[in-house]
Amino acid sequence: MPTLLEQEPTVVIPPRHSAPPPAPVRPRRRRPSLAFVEVAVLAVLALALAVLALRRSTATAAAGAAPFSAPIPERVAPAVRGQEVAQLASPPSVPRRITRSYATKVIVNLEVVEKTMRLADGVEYAFWTFGGTVPGSFIRVREGDQVELRLKNHPGSTVPHNIDLHAVTGPGGGAEASLAVPGQESVFRFTALNPGLYAYHCAFAPASLHVANGMYGLILVEPREGMPAVDREYYVMQGDFYTRGAHGAPGLQPFDMAKAVAEQPDYVVFNGSVGSLTGDNALKARTGETVRLFVGNGGPNLTSSFHVIGEVFDNVFTEGGTTAQHNVQTTSIPPGGAAIVEFRTETPGKLVLVDHALFRAFNKGTVGLMQVEGEPRGGAFAGPVPAPGAAGR
């Protein structure tokens, strides 16, 4: 039996003497009215305008907010003029703003010092430091500067040290070129190509141990156009510490490797010790002033949820980068990371700096204070008011 494809077509042959079929009657065509033509023309114009608008919006999105559209710049070291010695600052202080409009050679003299210092009341710890403080000295340079970093390792140190600056684009962030044994000095150069706020730390093996002992700090690379002036600038850096004794156990406490590996710190603190930013050491401001905090996280393990109780951050430069978010309550800072937060103070009183992982704050030490003086500004806070109906009781 043939398949459908194998069947021959059926041909119908009309009879020989049949009359031809009558010709079909074609309907009489009507010319379109003028109104119909106008409507059609308007519809075509509207469609054309819609297509043009869609193309323009697509082009605008591609040039602006389209994902993965940011170009990767090619950065080249500029010519430098003269040289200067960097003015370093110990926390919570910050070196003065850079006002020059050109790149120069900046000499950074930094010494590694191993020293025993206060971790909490009645508790001491053998810290390893850059410049004698935890965190280490704040370094401030300008985009395009040629930085000559001279790292000395104090003769009293027990081990070699080096420095890895996250602002460096080169092997180990400079660690391979900066190794210094006790009593010696290393020198290396780099160009600060990328603006932003960057962490630095010791990277001599085991790097985790050196960081856990307090070897970290911040370097700010100001953009070529500079940074807007503010009334106050402060340097705050968080770190987690692991001691043989429990939190508050008195005396000199040695480092506990098992707790560090388990990520179970006994202390989580700002600027190297419990209470470093309280009492006489509280940060200061007046109402109506603008405040810029350079905030870092040395780790070595925990991410910081940085928050100021009683303020909203007007600007947050997340990850230490150069793009701001606005009206932020809490910002995350990973180990080895940083952020710049800015706000204006409106209300007198105490602002409380915390890691908003609150058991760390109130049980392990990440609490600081900013004392704000002056008159209330802008009607921001009215204070307590009578409860409804209280006057008639």
Image: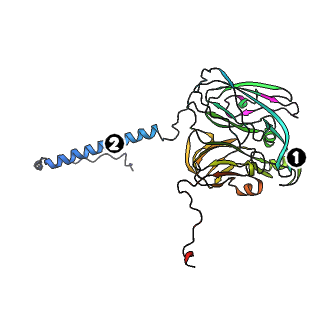
Of residues 263 and 127, the one nearer the viewer is: 127
Q: Nearer the viewer, residue 248 or 118?
A: 118
Frontmost residue, 280 versus 326: 280
Residue 111, horizontal then vertical, whole percent: 79, 31
Q: Secondary structure at mark 2?
A: helix
Residue 178 in view of the camera? no
Residue type at tag 2: Val
What residue appears at the point 53 percent right and 33 percent down from the top-left corner? 71
Q: Is residue 348 left or right of residue 243?
A: left
Which amino acid, by three-letter code, is at mark 1? Pro
Q: Is residue 231 magenta?
A: no
Does the magenta portion include 166?
yes
Residue 51, numbered circle: 2
* Residue 299 locus on image (x, y percent): 74, 45
The part of the image, by quadrant, that contains residue 55 is top left
Quarter where residue 296 is shown: top right
Q: Which residue is rendered at x = 80% and y = 39% of the image?
A: 210
Q: Which of 379 and 148 lies nearest the eye of the viewer?
A: 379
- The image shows residue 232, relative to residue 162, as above or below, that is below
Which numbered mark, 2 or 1, is in the foreground of this view? 1
The residue where tag 1 is placed is 254
